Amino acid sequence: MQRKQILVTGGAGYIGSHTIVTLLEEGYEPIVLDDFRNANPAVIKKLQKLTKKEIPFFNFSCCDFDKLIQLFKKYSFSGVIHFAADKAVGESVVNPLKYFDNNITGLISLLKVIEKYPNTNLVFSSSCTVYGNPTSYPVTESFPVGFNSPYGFTKLCNEQMLMQFHTALQSTKICSLRYFNPIGAHESGLIGEEPIGAPNNLVPFITQTAAGWREQLTVFGNDYNTPDGSCLRDYIHVMDLAEAHVSALKYLEKRKEGCNAIFNIGTGIPTSVLELIKVFEQETGKTLNWKFGPRRAGDVPAIYANVEKSLKELHWKAKRSVNEAVLSAWNFQKHSLITNPSIK
Ligand code: UFG
């Protein structure tokens, strides 16, 4: 049987690269599009080594409509997973235009192509950031939406664009996945989260501090109205997240009619920053150098998912524990130390 061809925009990035592995395991043929603005080109070679498969890849921006349509002429995509976007919340506050430009234009360009190829299923990479600052938890998909940063604004805007596009072209099949906090790495230690420069996110900062690349972790805030005063998040193993994308593709493939569905992709389990540090120390036997610092602007005190809808309709749920996720991130960090000690 012919394998289904899936275009993966941003396929060399953190979540994209792990999803490529799962797509190949599930019998799909992924084709990567990435402009490597925030991804390491070496990831493609690592993916080929890991999966022992040739992975076609194209180096241009998803915003480039002319090139994108050529790609659709070359392949017969049954689906697109659209990861390609800028994603640093803090940077978006300083440079909102970069986010409007890439995240909004990228989706416009893709939708213009899908208008011409309306049988292409679309899985969109959204974020729990669209819930803004929720006043109760866990959050369901029907909670009010909002945004706290230009990045969050672009994700919400993208979801609205998809809704209105679908209203105009009702045969299209679209699924947005609202990710909670992805962490961890593939069990091989070959691929993982590779931020360029100092990490913004908690887990790479923890592993790089433990490895001696950073001197000390700062825990942002100890006076939140949470059980231990630090923020609560829903940390999900990146391989569980990768599997959610395949479940989303299958969900769309089974549907006879068009749709525009939205799902939370998390574990439903809240973990505080201090708990996560404890998990890291327990799992690795390392003592982490950390201190409390002031709250970080834009952080919400707590957010975690209600995952009933994804279980019921996508038939997906997170299988891996936060302990496994943290350990896999450390395994990746150790691997990076061996293979590329100069990257800091
Ligand atoms: N944190 C620290 N110290 C650090 C880094 C983070 O204490 O050095 C804390 C944060 O204050 C927060 C928690 O760790 O309480 C998680 O922070 P991350 O930066 O890892 O993740 P965020 O929850 O801020 O952001 C993530 C994604 C975004 C997404 C957002 C939605 O990175 O893309 O969730 O809430 F938009």
Image (tube, rainbow, N blue to C red):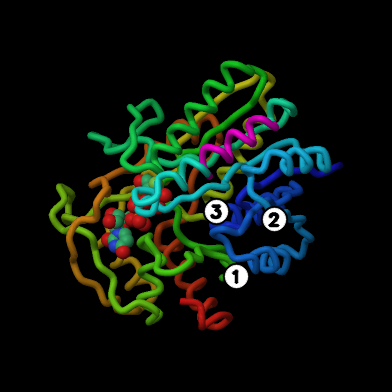
Furthest-right residue in view? 1
Q: Secondary structure at mark 3?
A: helix
Q: Nearer the viewer, residue 314 or 92?
A: 92
The foreground one among 314 and 120 is 120
> Who's the residue at 70% across and 44% down the image?
7
Q: Which residues are magenta?
A: 102-113
The correct choice, above or below, for 272 with respect to 318 in the image is: below
Mark 2 vs mark 1, CA separation in Å: 22 Å
Left or right, residue 137 beside residue 81: left
How far apart in space, not on screen, are marks 2 and 3 (Cα)? 18 Å
Q: Residues within 10 Å of mark 1 (few under 14, many from 20)?
A: some
Residue under label 1, please give it. 190
Given the image, on which type of amino acid does mark 1 rest?
Answer: Leu
The residue carrying mark 2 is 59
Is residue 96 something that shows in the picture?
Answer: yes
> Residue 248 in the image: x percent, y percent?
60, 37
Magenta residue check for 55? no
Picture quadrant of ligand 1: bottom left
Marks 3/1 in contact by CB < 8 Å: the verdict is no
Label 1 sits on a secondary structure element that is loop
